[in-house]
Amino acid sequence: MFHATIYNAAKPALQANVKQLYLTHISARYTKEVQRLMLERQAQTIFPASKVVGDFDVFDI
């Protein structure tokens, strides 16, 4: 099974008119903060309310 890409996550969020997209379970290839910010910026070009978060982070919705 393959992981979703940033596009695979952000495009449906945009189409579904959701308020916030939290991207989690990021590949181990992206361990540095600068790499995670790059992914977040890529997602935000499609869906501005995107944020890369950590596994097991908790948010009120």
Image (cartoon, grey):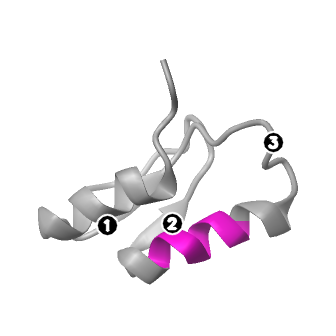
- In this rendering, the answer to whether 10 lies above or below 42 is above
Residue 36 versus residue 8 in the image, above or below: below
Task: Specify whether residue 41 is painted magenta.
Answer: yes
In the picture as drawn, the residue positioned furthest to the top comes out as: 1
Measure how far apart labels 1 and 2 are at the Cα level. 8 Å
Q: Which residue is mark 2?
A: 51
Whole-percent x, y for residue 24 in the image: 53, 44
Callout 2 environment at 10 Å: few (<14), some (14 to 19), or many (20+)? Answer: some
Above or below residue 40? Residue 45 is below
Question: SS at mark 2?
Answer: strand
Q: Which residue is mark 1?
A: 20
From mark 3 to mark 1, how far is it between C-alphas?
A: 24 Å
Residue 61 higher or lower than 44, as above or below: above
28 on left or right of 12: right
Contact between marks 1 and 2 (CB within 8 A): the answer is: yes
Q: What span is colored magenta in the figure? A: 37-44
In the image, taking residue 13 as reference, residue 17 lies left or right, namely left
Q: Which residue is mark 3?
A: 29
Residue at far right of view: 32
- Could you say whether the residue bearing mark 1 is in a helix, strand or loop? loop
State the image coordinates of residue 17 (x, y, percent, origin top left).
13, 70
